[in-house]
Image (cartoon, rainbow, N blue to C red):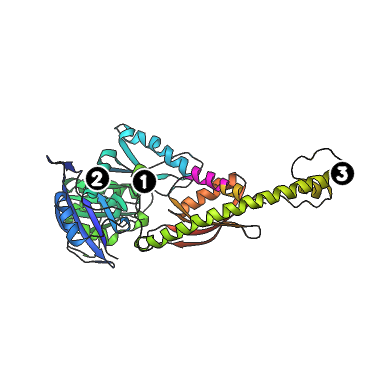
Amino acid sequence: MPRLFLRFMAPVARDEEGGFVGPAEWLVQSAGELAESSVRDDVANLAAWVEEHAEWADDPARVVAFVPAGETLATDCSVPGRNAAQIRKAAPYAIEEFITDDIETMHVACGALARGEPVRCLVARRDSVRDWLDCLLAAGVAPGCMTADAMALPVADNAVTVAYDGESALVRTAEQIASVDLVNLPSVLAALHDQIEAHGGAPMLQEMHGALSDVDMRAAGFTESAQADAIHDSLLGHLAAHFDGTERIDLLQGDFAVRRRAGAVWTRWRAVAAGLLAWGALGLVLAASQGIWASRQADGYRAAAVELYKETYGVARVAGNPASRMRRQLGQAPKETLGFHALLGNLGIALDEVGGSYKLLSISFSERSGFGADMLIASLDVLEDLQEALAERGFELEMVSAEQQPDDRVRANLRLAELS
């Protein structure tokens, strides 16, 4: 399946006609190979290129957008919270001390969330994120992931990765990303070298799409570097080839979360679904008629049961269900267990507390097998938060099976029961 990779070089602006302008680069990757040469042009020309080369670019699962690392801030912070939803809400306030702008003007995206662990955050101006998205939308492009370009660089412990791009370079370590002018690069690398050594590590330098001179290498404190393979003639080609969806923080969260389009399978079966819906409506009418008849029958049976209870126990009135009361009198009352509606209600409350991206595909319930749910969730972190939220309410959520989906989501078969 071909994928479109785009890289903005700077925040976009609007021209006199209301369109978007700004430098950008894009290319298509197919089956793991770069099928097209990269195009570096003004975003004003993106729509025409998409119409000719990537008509499928309105599918979020096939589009990745990179924004300038210099327009973002990546940092770790400690965020209190009992679950993922609370941590995500509190993150902007923990970030506030690291920025000089009003936090309300900034968009804070979080990496993987775990209670008691530092939270990795990526921060960008809210207006810039909105402009980048509006620019892509105007060109017929719907990104499924948007992150800083330096986030696409490979990363390893004690390593500094540098990717050269004209008069500047992208830099990434296990904890930091940056865009640095070449004249300042040796001093930045020297500081990172000393920082790694101070923590007891052996600093390593990996270079892509270029190399330091021998003089700058010595000034930075490194004796040698590892050169990444020349995969492509452009920096974006390198970024696309090394992009790992698990090693990045996606800006498309919160107000900017992706709303994925209906799949082609749904489009083909829409007419069939309409027919089934019509038959379903007819079935509901018939079921309602049967329900009214059954209700009248039940009223008759209940009246007979009430009279039998009065006659047997010599009472003038019966409170509650006479059949249940008679079973308790005889010591035959079964153990009471929560029913379908109670289990479903507690699952819904827990999902609301946890938040995150999820989709409930189906549910099942029977007295024998209990309550089951088939769900699509953003990650296993969301599932762990859901388990914790339900445990606090006195329930156990068991994962019967889990399957990774092509769009990085997880399909999980779950079973819900009261804690014994």
The residue positioned 67% from the left and 49% from the top of the image is 296
- Residue under label 1: 253
Looking at the rendered structure, the secondary structure element under dot 3 is: helix
> Which quadrant holds the N terminus?
bottom left
Q: Which label lies toward us, 3 or 2? A: 3
- Residue 57 left/right relative to 420: left
Label pair 3/1, CB-CB below 8 angstroms: no
- Residue under label 3: 313
Q: Which residues are magenta?
A: 345-355
Q: Please, what is the three-letter code of the amino acid marked with disc 2?
A: Asp
- Residue 367 left/right relative to 264: right
Residue 380 shows in the view: yes
The residue positioned 34% from the left and 62% from the top of the image is 264
Precedes in sequence: disc 1 or disc 2: 2
| Residue situated in front as seen by the camera: 75 or 189 | 75
Q: Which label lies toward us, 1 or 2? A: 2
- The number of discs equals 3
Q: CA distance from mark 3 to mark 1?
A: 64 Å
x and y percent of residue 347 in the render? Answer: 55, 48
| Residue situated in front as seen by the camera: 341 or 321 | 321
- Residue under label 2: 134
Disc 3 crowd rating (10 Å Cα; few below 14, some 14-19, many 20+) is few
